[in-house]
Image (tube, helix red, strand yellow):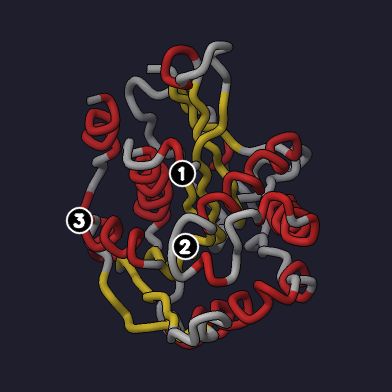
Amino acid sequence: MGIKIRPATVHDVPAVARLVLAALADESPWRAFVPRKAQARADLVEYAEAALRSLVRPAANPGHVGVCLLVLELSGADVGCRDGGPLVVAAVAWDAPAPDALVRPSRMSGVEDDTTHLFATTTANSASYDESADADAPGSVAGLVQAMSKGRAQRFLGHDPCLYLRLLATRPDYQRRGYGKVLAAKAVEFARQQHLSVCLQSAARGYILFSGLGFSDLGPVTLPADAKSGEDLMLKAMMLSQERVQRRGSWMESLFRYVSR
């Protein structure tokens, strides 16, 4: 199977931005803020690209581990098109405290993994996501961004140190193949080795995935009501505690076997 997990580069940003917008437009409640033709909306594309660029690890500082954006890339017959790729079909992003000494994560058998060099020892303080990008959110997503920022501050207070999962998205035409699970496992494995909890805010689809991985429900995060229907919308705050992260051990191999079926 031609699967490769690697750090995203600035050259990946346009494709990942469109992947994320397509995934958001395919699921409630995200679609209330991100319309189906979001990829044709210049303001949304520009905003998504700016936010993603702030998560791309600078090539000059590969040991700075506070923020991370990884992509899952397919090639060969797995792409499903004539030219055989490579094609980025999923992405994960997180930010976390950057300890003075980091442990190299284990590799996943059968998956080409170019991420282990990212976790070298560093003395840098925690890199932080550029929150200034949120101030430039287009009107259609500004309420969502503000609600999630508030939800993070309220629901995860007192749960530090914590790896915060900012993004987990798969192209709609490549969903239900286990790629999201593989990238989620990458984040949890990193958290396990660095003795961190994992926190996130999720919609219904992700709630099922993360509940199955042992995450606890910390309660709702209220979003602005749907502008068209008036329906109340919410996400769920979820956490995998340090203790549970450690108990899970290294289960990336079994997840890859799941994807390989």
For label 2, the crowd category at 10 Å Cα-Cα, with few meaning under 14, some 14 to 19 and many 20 or more, is many
Do the residues bearing badges 1 and 2 touch, measured as CB atoms within 8 Å? no
For label 3, the crowd category at 10 Å Cα-Cα, with few meaning under 14, some 14 to 19 and many 20 or more, is few
For label 1, the crowd category at 10 Å Cα-Cα, with few meaning under 14, some 14 to 19 and many 20 or more, is some
* Numbered disc 2: secondary structure: strand
* Numbered disc 3: secondary structure: helix
Rounded to the nearest angstrom, the CA distance separating label 2 from label 3 is: 17 Å
Mark 1, residue position: 172
| Amino acid type indicated by mark 3 | Arg
Disc 2 or 3, which lies upstream in sequence? 2
| Amino acid type indicated by mark 2 | Leu
Q: How many marks?
A: 3
Mark 3, residue position: 247
Q: Is residue 66 above or below residue 172?
A: below
Rounded to the nearest angstrom, the CA distance separating label 3 from label 1 is: 32 Å
Residue furthest to the front: 229
